């Protein structure tokens, strides 16, 4: 056989054996533990671009918030306890920052786009802060945004009906004016703690 043919066959074998495993890896949803590991020890970059729709129906991208710090939380409006607690703390933290807090944009990204339509979000977000922006989108858009932030979510059926809940990680991400990741608050962080950590970032210009 000619060398090029042998090379071609060898390459074909390599592609045939590797391609399916690569595809499987991409399609596989990452576990809550893997993603927590990635966030907690800063093992992977956090953040990145998103294209979503806000609670007024307006298309929004991460670039819309580029001159502000972003406080980003993933959750869903039907969440019985963790989401409301953390969103309330986020809203109170913004208020505690006073006029300087205008430069902080709180964002709530739904991980339940089926039920969290813009209308549903519009009924929900004002409970927590008048400037809280609710974001939703297609399943693919939500998955992309969540992947960038290494946020975990998975639909879980509630036995005996069509009802479901959504398991999700509850880190609150702080991003700088350039959209770069600064750090996270764990669930249950108080408004005062959040305000204390955020305050110096509002007054000091961020390094780009
Ligand atoms: Ni929740």
Image (cartoon, grey):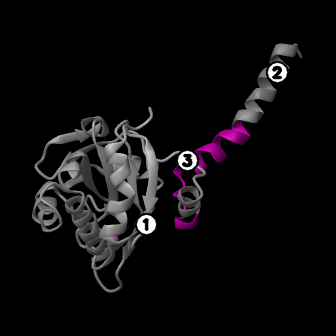
Beta carbon of the mark 1 residue lies under 8 A of ligand 1: no
Quadrant of the image occupied by residue 52? top left
On residue 7, which mark appears? 2
Q: Position of residue 94 (x, y in %)?
A: 23, 59
Counting other residues with Cα less than 10 Å from the Cα at mark 2, is it few (<14), some (14-19), or many (20 or more)? Answer: few
Q: Position of residue 83 (x, y in %)?
A: 30, 71
Quarter of the picture containing the N terminus is top right
Tell me if 61 is positioned left or right of 147 in this view.
left
Q: Is residue 129 left or right of residue 174?
A: left
Mark 3 vs 2: CB contact within 8 A: no
Q: Residue furthest bottom?
A: 160
Location of mark 1 (residue) = 169
Does 168 appear in magenta? no
Which corner quadrant of the image does residue 206 belong to? top left
State which tag comes first along the sequence, 3 or 1.
3
In this rendering, the answer to whether 56 lies above or below 151 is above
Image quadrant of residue 7?
top right
**Which label belongs to residue 26?**
3
Q: Could you tell me which residue is drawn at 66 percent across and 47 percent down?
A: 21
Query: Could you tell me which residue is drawn at 28 percent across and 69 percent down?
Result: 89
């Amino acid at each position: 056989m000619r060398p090029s043919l042998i090379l071609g066959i060898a390459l074909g074998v390599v592609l045939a054996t590797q391609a399916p495993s690569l595809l499987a890896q991409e399609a596989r949803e990452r576990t809550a533990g893997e993603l927590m590991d990635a966030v907690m020890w800063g093992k992977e970059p956090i953040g990145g671009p998103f294209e979503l729709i806000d609670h007024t129906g307006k298309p929004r991208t991460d670039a819309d918030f580029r001159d502000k710090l972003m406080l980003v939380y993933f959750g869903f409006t039907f969440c019985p306890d963790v989401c409301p607690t953390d969103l309330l703390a986020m809203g109170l933290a913004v208020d505690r920052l006073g006029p300087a807090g205008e430069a902080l944009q709180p964002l709530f990204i739904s991980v339940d786009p089926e039920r969290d339509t813009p209308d549903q979000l519009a009924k929900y977000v004002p409970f927590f802060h008048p400037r809280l922006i609710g974001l939703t989108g297609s399943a693919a858009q939500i998955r992309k945004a969540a992947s960038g932030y290494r946020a975990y979510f998975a639909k879980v059926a509630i036995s005996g009906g069509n009802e479901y809940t959504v398991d999700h990680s509850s880190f609150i991400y702080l991003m700088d004016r350039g959209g770069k990741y600064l750090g996270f608050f764990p669930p249950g962080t108080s408004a005062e703690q959040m305000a204390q950590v955020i305050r110096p970032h509002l007054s000091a210009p961020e390094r780009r």
